[in-house]
Amino acid sequence: MKEASDIREGLLGKYAEVPYATEPLWWDRRLGVPANLRTIRHYMEKYAPSIPTGCAFDEAAVMVPTPIVHEILTKDLLAAGWELFNEAADLVFTNPFGTRYTVEYTFFRHLAWPFRLEVMLLGQPAGRDQLVGFSPLHQALWYPNGDRPNWASHAEFPIPHLSFKVAEGMKFGQATDLLRGSGFVPAQVCQSTYGVFGYFIHNDAMRQVYVKPRINRRDEVAK
């Protein structure tokens, strides 16, 4: 009978052309707020030439697993001079998977940075003790390649997306077509009580960080 290690080695040899699984882009508390912001800025600058003309990245998200971790990250940001300026909740429908999920957002801004931070907590509105609904894309970030993250460390949180508002006069479909033409692949498109948005990843991406175009009524109150 073959050992599991022999079987694994055989599979890896047989499927040598299959790429390694990619990990999310992590917000790492151990590095401090400024270092994580520089990482976000690096990826924004990397992808800025690929988004539609007239659009600019103005938001990055950090996803936390529990309300307690949300409080920890909030304290980090406030201590670093960020201002908590808005909160919102949403019910989201996902395509092509046909699932729904609830999510809570907290928005932060800083005069020295040209983008806001959205701290997102997939929703537990009834007691906050169980996940309500399911977002395939976001759950995959918590379980890269099927591995459960070490939440106990309160150290690493996925950065799911870098977002831009679709320019005035441009339709959402026009923006997504331009992204496809720049080498991006659609991963998940969502409809919500706040509008429509999508998640796109570049063909050559080495980390699971998504570009998120949005037409979102939330922006009228989250400027």
Image: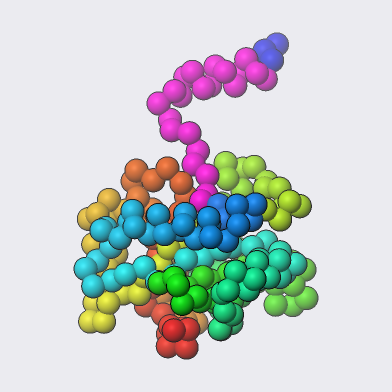
Q: Residue 64 at what x, y percent from top left?
A: 64, 63
Q: Which of the 4 quarters of the picture holds residue 175?
A: bottom left
Coloring applied to the structure: rainbow
Task: Please indicate whether residue 154 sits to the left or right of residue 193 in the image.
Answer: right
Q: Nearer the viewer, residue 133 or 210?
A: 210
Residue 221 colored in magenta in the image: no
Task: Please indicate whether residue 44 sits to the left or right of residue 23 in the image.
Answer: left
Q: Residue furthest bottom?
A: 221
Q: Residue 88 at what x, y percent from top left?
A: 57, 82
Q: Residue 102 at what x, y percent from top left?
A: 60, 73
The residue lying at 64 percent from left, 71 percent from top is: 79
Q: Is residue 26 in view from this perspective?
A: yes
Q: Is residue 136 in view from this perspective?
A: no
Q: Residue furthest top?
A: 1
Q: Above or below — where is 128 with respect to 156?
A: below
Q: Residue 132 at what x, y percent from top left?
A: 67, 69
Residue 24 colored in magenta in the image: yes
The quadrant the N terminus occupies is: top right
Q: Nearer the viewer, residue 89 or 151?
A: 151
Range covered by the magenta-colored residues: 4-25
The quadrant the C terminus occupies is: bottom left
Q: Above or below — where is 104 with respect to 220?
A: above
Q: How many marks?
A: 0
Q: Nearer the viewer, residue 176 or 218?
A: 218
Q: Nearer the viewer, residue 117 or 125?
A: 117
Q: Which of the 4 quarters of the picture holds residue 27?
A: bottom right
The residue lying at 41 percent from left, 67 percent from top is: 163
The residue lying at 33 percent from left, 46 percent from top is: 203
The residue lying at 48 percent from left, 84 percent from top is: 222
